[in-house]
Image (tube, rainbow, N blue to C red):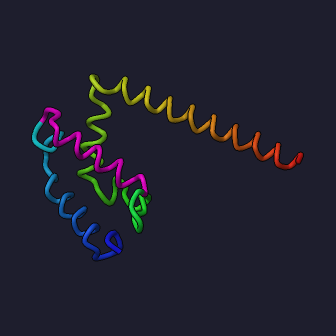
C-alpha cells in the first residue's frame, strides 16, 4: 500500500516533513504564506483517512513535528483564531446532532 511502511505515499510524507523543517515559526519565515496554508491542508488530509491504507491516527505532533508546529502557529494567529474557534464549535454541534439522530433512529427501530 502506498501509505504503508516504505510505500511511496509514506516516503513522500516524510520527505515533505524534512523539507519544511526550520527554526522559523512558519514554513518560509515568520509570516503566514500560502505554503503554510498548504501544510495545514496537508495535515487535515492526512488525518481524514481519505485514502485507502492511510491511518490518520499515525500522523501526530510526534511523527510530523514540523507539520504540526505550522498548524499550531496558524491556529494561534489572531487573524485566524476566530475562524478556527467557530469551525470547531460547528463541528461539535454537527457531531452532537448526528449522535442524537442516530439515537432517535435506533430507538425508532427498536420500537418497530
Name, please, the residue furthest toward the front: 112
Question: 47 left or right of 16?
Answer: right
What is the x, y in percent for residue 78? 28, 23
What is the x, y in percent for residue 81? 34, 26
Depth check, front residue: 94 or 108: 108
Whether residue 46 is in magenta: the answer is yes
Q: Residue at x 31, y 71 (%)?
A: 2
Question: 96 left or right of 80?
Answer: right
Q: Give the vertical position of 104 relative to 59 (above or below).
A: above
Q: Give the vertical position of 102 relative to 14 (above or below).
A: above
Depth check, front residue: 25 or 112: 112
Picture quadrant where residue 97 is located: top right
Q: Residue at x 30, y 31 (%)?
A: 76
Q: Give the vertical position of 18 relative to 100 (above or below).
A: below
Q: Give the vertical position of 111 relative to 54 (above or below).
A: above
Q: Residue at x 46, y 33 (%)?
A: 88
What is the x, y in percent for residue 22? 13, 49
Q: How many marks?
A: 0
Q: Residue at x 24, y 43 (%)?
A: 70
Name, please, the residue furthest toward the right: 111
Q: Which residues are magenta?
A: 30-49
Whether residue 15 is in magenta: the answer is no
What is the x, y in percent for residue 21? 16, 53
Q: In which quadrant is the N terminus drawn?
A: bottom left
Picture quadrant where residue 101 is located: top right
Q: Main secondary structure of the magenta part?
A: helix
Amino acid at each position: 500500500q502506498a501509505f504503508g511502511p516504505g510505500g511511496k505515499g509514506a516516503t513522500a510524507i516524510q520527505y515533505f516533513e524534512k523539507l519544511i523543517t526550520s527554526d522559523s515559526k512558519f514554513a518560509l519565515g515568520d509570516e503566514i504564506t500560502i505554503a503554510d496554508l498548504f501544510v495545514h491542508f496537508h495535515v487535515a488530509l492526512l488525518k481524514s483517512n481519505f485514502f485507502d491504507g492511510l491511518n490518520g491516527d499515525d500522523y501526530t505532533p510526534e511523527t510530523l513535528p514540523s507539520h504540526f508546529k505550522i498548524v499550531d502557529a496558524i491556529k494561534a494567529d489572531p487573524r485566524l483564531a476566530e475562524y478556527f474557534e467557530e469551525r470547531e464549535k460547528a463541528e461539535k454541534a454537527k457531531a452532537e446532532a448526528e449522535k442524537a439522530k442516530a439515537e432517535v433512529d435506533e430507538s425508532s427501530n427498536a420500537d418497530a
